[in-house]
Amino acid sequence: MNFRIRYNREKIKELVSYLQKAYELGDIHIVKRVSAMLRIHEGQSIIYVSQTLGVSIQTIYNWLKVFLLNGYGSFKFNYSPGRKPKLSKAQKLELKQCLLLSPTEYGYDTECWNTLIITDLIYRKWGVLYHRGYLCQLLHNLGFSWQKARFVSDHLNPIKRQEWKQNWHNILKQAQQMNALLLFGDEASFPQWGTLSYTWALKGCQPIVQTSGKRKAYKVFGLIDYFSGRMFYQGHTGRFNSESYQHFLLFVMQQTDRHIFLIQDNARYHTSASMERFFLEYNSYCSPITFIFTGLQPHRVSMEEG
């Protein structure tokens, strides 16, 4: 038997509202019941509605009867609490505190947290095994994000660094009083062989980049004056060692007769016995040099002016 029940606009709006809510909650049972009421209003037959929704004809009649007697009270949503969390709130807070520390504190050989290590940590502490995909969502909820770390050398001595900051003001003042060059030095190496890189190419056709295969590099020494920005540099194709560094410093001293404050790092060829003799010898008859090392143990040797 086919029949049609008509609703006014207000009832249709309410039915549509219930249908949307059922979809949001994922309550498929209420979705079917509300859809059946709307389809009957549109004039669809009971048989067609039952076939479309995948339920029996008697079920459609039962839904219709309850709706006509109880109205919207017949739509009782099933609020699913979801699966019980694997970790309690207290355990999640403890996990957050763990992740604020370094992985090395828990026996791992890295300073960076990743999902594999965190999964292992959770399993070791609480015997709970998380899927990597869900663990990312958990970490986001705890206030974490996947980001690039900033690396800091582990051999830096904070006490010596503070001493260097204090000495810097004295060095700057002394250089200003003497009208000296305050030179910061470093070196750079530029490889002359080709390096593979990314480039646009047809799919399935790996591009070929020609390279000489010669493992040669162009080396450059450089010094820059703190006050004027004047730069001294010299390139060569040999190795960085005390001899090549001495040639560079001779090249610099030939271009000025002013006192030089030379600030350099603790590279071996900067602190070698050969370099110590070099500074002592040239201080006796050339422009005096004050050389300062900046490294793990800052050390300064000052020469008297000639």
Image (spheres, helix red, strand yellow):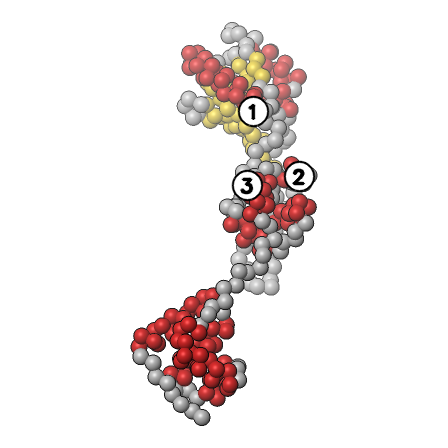
Q: Residue furthest bottom?
A: 1
Which secondary structure, mark 3?
loop
Which secondary structure, mark 2?
helix
Q: Is residue 294 visible?
A: no
Question: Residue 199 at what x, y percent from top left?
Answer: 54, 55
> Mark 1 is on which residue type?
Pro
Judge by depth and name the residue closer to the eye, 44 or 115: 44
Q: Residue furthest left?
A: 9
Residue at the spot 49% in from the left edge and 69% down from the top edge: 27
Earlier in the chain: of badge 3 and badge 2, it is 2
What is the distance, in whole Å, between disc 3 and disc 2 at their CAs?
19 Å
What is the distance, in whole Å, between disc 3 and disc 1 at their CAs?
20 Å
Which secondary structure, mark 1?
helix
Residue at the spot 56% in from the left edge and 36% down from the top edge: 151
On screen, residue 8 versus residue 201, left or right, reads: left
Earlier in the chain: of badge 3 and badge 1, it is 3
Tell me if residue 89 comes above or below residue 163 in the rendering. below
Q: Which residue is mark 1?
A: 158
Tell me if residue 306 comes above or below residue 97 in the rendering. above
Q: Which residue is mark 3?
A: 149
